[in-house]
Image: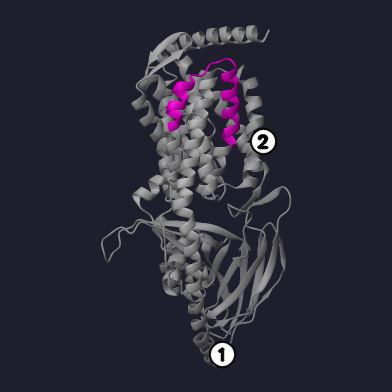
Amino acid sequence: MKRFWVSVIIALSATVFMLYQNGAFAEKPKETKAQAAKEEKKPAAKAEQKPEAKQEEKKVEALAAPTIQTDKTSLNNGGTVTVTGTAPAGKPVYIEVWGEKKVRASRFDADVDKETGKRPYILYMTYEMPAYYKIFVPKDKKEDFEKIKKEGKKWAYSKALKDLGADIAYSIPAKVKIDRYQATLMGSIIGSRGELLPAMDEKENKKRSMQLVKARFRSPGNVLAPTVEVTPDGTYKAEVKIPKGSAPGKYTIVAVVDKNAKSQPVSIENSISFPNVYLTNAGTSLNLFGPFLLTLGIVIFGVLMGAGGGFIMNPLLVSIWPLPHTVVAGTVMPTVLFSQGSGIYNYSKIKFISWKLGVAIGLAMVAGGFIGPKLTELITLSQFKFVFGWILLILAALMFWQTTPGYIAKNKKEQAIIKEFKKKAEEAAKAKQS
Amino acid sequence: MIVEFWGHEFKVNIVLGCIGGFLIAIVSSMFGFGGGPFMVPLMTVGLGLPMYVVVGSSLLAIFFNTLMGTMRHYQFGNFDLLFFLIMFPAAILGGFIAPQIAKRVSPLTVKRVAVVGLVLLALNLLGVY
């Protein structure tokens, strides 16, 4: 037992040291730099306000702002709101809708830069992405929209906005605060996000925000919809559909005909009630019985087949619900901690653990576990799914190997030995007690 | 390294064990699973240890990884408390129900079902269908 405590102390101190290292090198400069970035932003914002105000005055004469009405002011776990109004005749009308709840979005830029030919390795990250964001475009753009859909995974949000003419309506995500980190190999190994780079100017921020919108919402159908009906006399009508599972809270709707001709914002309230719950970190609301039953079923199956449930759990969770893979990986891990802990306790009671062996390999695994979670946010969901696909194929091969006759024969012997040892161990433990 | 277990001594190639464990730990903490099904073959086939030494010790090694991975995921803001509170009771409940069912089904059948299921899920993830 003495040996156990010594090893635990070693492991804990190594962990604390690693965390301290990371905290000292990565966290502190972040704060000061973030402050500096804020300060930089302020004068820039002030400078912009003035010309904008002037432009607006001019444009108001040229193009009247559209009017807007909605048929509802509240929704219960999503629904359809009909938006109507009048816009200057002959102009396409875009409707921008966003939710007040904010979520995290990140994108790791490792694509070759066309100008320099180098890979930038920069991690873009924001905590202010709206949990729901969509631009509804006029119905006659449907063909263009279908084309974008056909591009598959490689579609670009910025190009889609331009093709549909929707870039005039794109405003909310453009203003989110985006942090940039210069990732390095060494930084990734010690588990830091890297050096925080200075804040970007407005134009660059807008460009990067579009990439983050794609990273967060993935497919074109989630951020664009060609549903606005515009009649020649300028009245328009659109059905704004807030899907089930969207974040609760206030949704703001604005009709846009031009950059400076926007309607007054209208807001509707989306409420969710038990058993639907909103997962703050994931930005999704779901029926809580869904994941509960899924976990229950998979844990049972996992125990029966002798593999933890995480293997099946994670891919299913990201496939069934619109959950970010980072949150799924980060939340499934702690759920197995308890069962592992109780397993260790049971084995240790009958002295069925080689502490020396377990701790030696465990220390190597601690180092691995330190690096892994950092890498999760560097990959996209499709990469996550792709690698997971191969991991599962390997696991399936291992499982298949365990059903071959040779393995079964060997396993039978070993199971018999385990039983015998367990019996001995239990007897020894009992003898000690009495 | 020499490991003593219930009166038997085993010679273990600890370098191989540590490198293998390290790599498995990176992948498993990155994708958020335990890693047991990979650790057990590593220790039985790779290190040549008998099953009865491996069952407990591999669990201990994985526990270190899960603990560290959990802390790091939390640090990077990947942990959702409510989501955890939904899944955690289900996991505990499953842990109690499973042994009851285990007595009635053959592990071989379960494994065969698992192979088919895993391949189907994998092909789905790889976008084959």
Give the camera-side residue of A298 and B126: A298
Q: In the figure, is residue A134 to the left or right of A248?
A: left
In the picture, the quarter occupied by the C terminus of chain B is top left
| Vertical placement of residue A234 versus B52, above or below | below
Q: Residue under circle 1? A: A60
Q: Secondary structure at mark 1?
A: helix
The answer to if A348 sits in the magenta stretch is: yes
Q: The residue marked by circle 1 belongs to what chain?
A: A
**Horizontal and vertical percent position of residue B53:** 47, 16
Q: Main secondary structure of the magenta part?
A: helix
**Residue at mark 2:** B89
> Left or right of A11: which side holds A72?
right
- The amino acid type of the residue labelled 2 equals Pro
Is residue A402 a member of the stretch shown in magenta? Answer: no
Using the image, name the chain to which the residue with label 2 belongs: B
- Mark 2 crowdedness (10 Å alpha carbons): few <14, some 14-19, many ≥20: some
Kind of element beneath mark 2: helix
Q: Is residue B125 visible?
A: no
Magenta region, residue range: A335-363
Separation (CA) of disc 2 from disc 1: 59 Å
Q: Are marks 2 and 1 on the same chain?
A: no
Residue A238 vs residue B69, the one in the foreground: B69
Q: Is residue A322 above or below residue A42?
A: above
Q: Residue at x 50, y 72 (%)?
A: A39
The residue most toward the left is A117
Q: Are marks 2 and 1 in contact (CB under 8 Å)?
A: no
Amino acid type of disc 1? Val
Q: Position of residue A152 (x, y in %)?
A: 41, 56
Please name whichever residue, A8 or B35, is drawn nearer the observer in this view of the structure. A8
Instruction: Please say if A109 is above or below A189.
Output: below
